[in-house]
Amino acid sequence: MSNLDRTPSLTHSGESEVAARPVLERFEGRAVRLGQSTEVRRLLPNLGRRLVGPWCFVDHYGPDDIATQPGMQVPPHPHIGLQTVSWLRAGEVRHRDSLGNDMTIRPGELGLMTSGAGIVHAEYSPVPHPVMLHGAQLWVALPLDAAATAPGWEHHANLPKLTADGIEITVFLGELSDERSPGTTFSDLAGASIRIAGGRRDVIALEPDFEYAALVLSGSVTIEGAPLTVGTMLYLGTGRASLHFTSETGAEFLLLGGAPFGEQIVMWWNFVARSDDEIVAARDRWGEGGFGAVAGAGEPLKAPPLPPGRLRPGGATR
C-alpha cells in the first residue's frame, strides 16, 4: 500500500528514539485519505515515535461499508528499502506487482512484499468485492545489508496460531511464544494478531530486548493497566518479559515488536533509504520509468514534490 500524501513528510529515524525501559505511551491515529474512497488512521510514524523495532509505518483502515463503493483503489507506485505487510480482518485486496504476481489477499492471510532495490505494485478491491473492508498495512524497514536485495512477493494462507479458552493469537510475521511465521524476515521481529473474548484476561511472554507496541483493531482492551480503544496505539518500550491484557467486551489488537533497529534511516513518500541523496535518486528513477510497471493496472502515481529546503546535500541523515 502507498503513502498517498501529496505533501509527505521527510523523517529521519534511528536508535536514539528507543525507550530503554518499559513505558506506556499512547498515540491516536491521524486521518489520511487513501485513494478515492478509503480513509486510514496513520499510527506510525508519529510525532513521538518513528520506529518500533524495524516497523516503520502503520495504517489502520475500516471497518468500511463499501457495498456501493469501489473500495481500495491504490494505483501503481514504487517502493525501495522496505517490506509491506498486508493484514485483513474483513474484505479482500487484490495485489499486482511488476514481477508479474497477481494475488487476492483474504482475512487471516499474509501478503508480504519485499521491495529491496525496487518494485512497483498496485492494490485494489476486486470486482465484485465483499461488503466490508477492514485491515492494516504495515511496513518493515530493511537493514542495510538487505536494503538492495532482490524484490519478491509471498502469500501465506496458513499461519501459526496459539489458542486457549477465549484467546487466539496468529503470528503473521517473525516469532512470538515459540511460534514462527513462514514469512521471510531480515531482522529479529514479532508481528501478531491477538483476539480476546469478552471477560477474558491473559499474559504472554515477550523478549525483554525487543521494543513493542500494540494497536487496537476492534473492541476495547486494557494492556498493562492502560485502557485502549479502536485506532489507538500503545508504545510499550523495552525490558518487558511478559504482557498482561484483559477485555470486558472482546477485542482484537496487533502486537508489533522487534530488536531496536540500530540504524539511521530516511523515510519519504514510499521510500526507505539511508540518505537524502538516495531519496532524490529514487524519485528521479521513478519519474524516468526505471522501476518497471504493472501492466493493465491503470495510470501510475506521480511522485509528489520534494519538501522545499528539507533535503540536505551530501546525503547526511542527521
Image (spheres, helix red, strand yellow):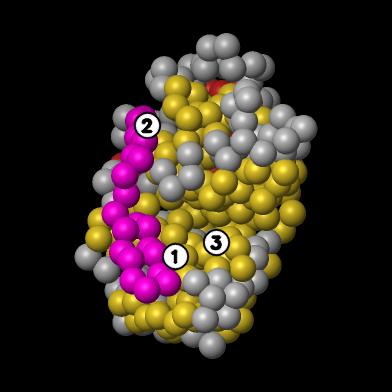
Q: Amino acid at mark 1?
A: Ile
Secondary structure at numbered mark 3: loop
Neighbours of disc 1 within 10 Å: few (<14), some (14-19), many (20+): many
Pick whichever, 225 or 48, lies toward us.
Answer: 225
Range of the magenta residues? 151-171
**Outermost residue toward the top?**
296
| In-image side of 9 versus 116 (left or right) | right
Q: For mark 3, what is the residue?
A: 50
> Is the residue 99 above or below the residue 52 in the image?
above
Q: Amino acid at mark 2?
A: Trp
Coordinates of residue 220 in the picture (x, y in percent): 61, 73
**Are dots 3 and 2 in contact, CB under 8 Å?**
no
The label shown at residue 153 is 2
Q: Chief secondary structure of the magenta span?
A: strand
Residue located at (41% from left, 43% from top):
109
Q: Earlier in the sequence, mark 1 or mark 3?
A: 3
The label shown at residue 194 is 1
